[in-house]
Image: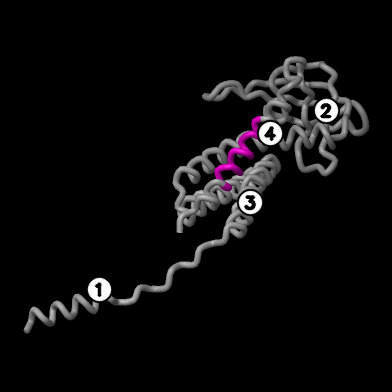
Amino acid sequence: MSGKRVAAMSGVQGTAPEGPPRPSVSTARKAAGSLVWAVALPAVIILGSGLGQWMTWLGVVVVLGAVAVAACLIGGVWHRAGAATLASVAGFGLMLFAGPAVYEVYMKTVGDPVAAVVTEVTDRQQRRGADMFCTVEERGGDRTRHEVSQQENCFGQAEVGDRVEIRKDPLGLFDPRLPDSPDQRNTTEITVAVTTGLALLTAAATFYGGQRRRG
């Protein structure tokens, strides 16, 4: 009697209806969604890196947020761990190069040229190496003084008394930028090229993860 009951119960369990199948995402919607994320994530990282040149903490928050979203979306929602790792690593690299690229292109394109003279060059030696600072004084108007760091292209290429043409931000958000030395002629182009490559790599990893998503 008990054997028949067990058999009957197992038969009922075996024939229990399963839940409705999860609807699959259409190919067109999948491609469109993947493309949107592939464009949005690198764009936000580049924007955050540019903001970091003006306000460091704000740029860090934006960039880290974008990288975290990429990792959670690609690795946690789409279940593509390899693509998530590649997008995250490329995103961090993009953060390092995009900030200087945005600053240099912006200042060289929109910055106002102003004649100035170098009044002081100091090396505030740190444990990680040289930490150069340059003080420049505008030659016209109220002879405003500016102290710029390596971020603004002070690498010891200018000496005290040198007359230079600095670039000033017309919006006043960024510090002035010193001109390039003869051996720095292609640094901006190289920085932009690396930034472009990392942005494309981040976008490709994101798009691949979206197209090959599981579940």
Identify residue type, mark 1. Answer: Gly
Q: Nearer the viewer, residue 87 or 171?
A: 87
Cα distance between the residues tagged 1 and 3: 43 Å
Image quarter for residue 185? top right
- Asked whether the residues under the numbered discs 2 and 4 touch, taking CB atoms below 8 Å apart as contact, a structural biologist would say no
Q: Up-down: is 113 above or below 180?
A: below
Q: CA distance from mark 3 to mark 4?
A: 27 Å
Check if residue 205 falls in the magenta segment. Answer: yes
Q: Main secondary structure of the magenta part?
A: helix
Whichever of callouts 2 and 3 sits on the residue coming sooner in the sequence is 3
**Distance of mark 2 from mark 4, alpha carbons?**
17 Å
Please tell me whether mark 1 or mark 4 is closer to you in this view. 1
Disc 4, SS: helix
Residue linked to disc 4:
100
Marks 3 and 4 in Cβ contact (< 8 Å): no
Q: Which mark is residue 14?
A: 1
Residue labelled with disc 2: 166
Q: Does residue 39 belong to the magenta stretch?
A: no
Q: Position of residue 154 (x, y in %)?
A: 71, 24
Query: Tag 4: residue type?
Result: Pro
Dot label at residue 35: 3
| Region of the chain picked out in magenta, as a range | 194-207
Give the secondary structure at mark 3.
helix
State which tag comes first along the sequence, 1 or 4.
1
